[in-house]
Amino acid sequence: MENLASYGFAILVGFSLSAACGLRIFAPLAMVSIGLHLGWINPGHGFAWLGSLPAMVCLCCACVIEILGMLIPWLDHALDVAGAPVAALAGTLIMAAQLAAASGIETSTMPPWVTGTLAIVVGGGAAFSVHAATGTLRAGSTAVSGGLLNPLFALAETFSSIVLAGLAIILPLLAVLVAISFILALIAMVYWARQWRQRTNK
């Protein structure tokens, strides 16, 4: 029972981090890598490399490049389109790392295919869904402002990703509530944006 509770808790944390990856692909990965490197987070079996110095440096550099690139109008849209599959992979990876780190989990208790399926469906699905929703909103921002408002949109995404990832590490239960509320808000905003577009096209 304790093992299942630990596994369920890992799913919640992984879900929050995966949603954060949908906003900024490398920010949550860099934060997890730093946490692993400093010993704040326990590495799961097979994921100790994520906290190594080379991995941490590479992820932090990728994070900075991504953040700066998303501040450039029109380039942000290209990065957003190209980053959709990468976001899904990042969400899958970060979910798998959390599940592997769940204390007391043995392969005899939880089959590997269950962990793999959860990592792909929940982790990759959450990251891809958030990434797709914010991409739709960014496209709307580009159409309305000609890309002038996109840097502000990018800063909001970066801030939200860092805050959500930080909450997932420090206050995971709160992070889950924030992630669910954020995803629901994104869905509502995308729906309203499409309704507005249909009305203006008539």
Image (cartoon, rainbow, N blue to C red):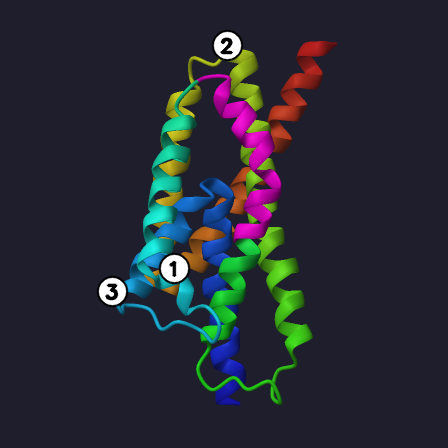
**Identity of the amino acid at label 1?**
Ala
Q: Which residues are magenta?
A: 73-90
Q: Is residue 184 left or right of residue 117?
A: left
Q: Residue at x 60, y 88 (%)?
A: 109
Graded by Cα atoms within 10 Å as few (under 14), some (14 to 19) or many (20 or more), the crowding at tag 3 reads few
Q: Which mark is residue 38?
A: 3
**Which comes sooner in the sequence, label 2 or label 3?**
3
Which of pointers 2 and 3 indicates the residue nearer the eye? 3
Q: Residue at x 39, y 71 (%)?
A: 43
SS of the residue under disc 2: loop
**Which comes sooner in the sequence, label 3 or label 1?**
3
Whether 84 is among the magenta residues is: yes
**Identity of the amino acid at label 3?**
Leu
- Marks 1 and 2 sit apart, C-alpha to C-alpha, by 35 Å
Q: Residue at x 41, y 27 (%)?
A: 69
Closer to the camera in the image, 152 or 85: 85
Question: Which image quadrant is residue 70 in?
Answer: top left
Q: Is residue 167 visible in the rendered structure shown here?
A: no
Q: Which mark is residue 168?
A: 1
- Marks 3 and 1 sit apart, C-alpha to C-alpha, by 17 Å
Provide the residue designation for mark 2. Answer: 146
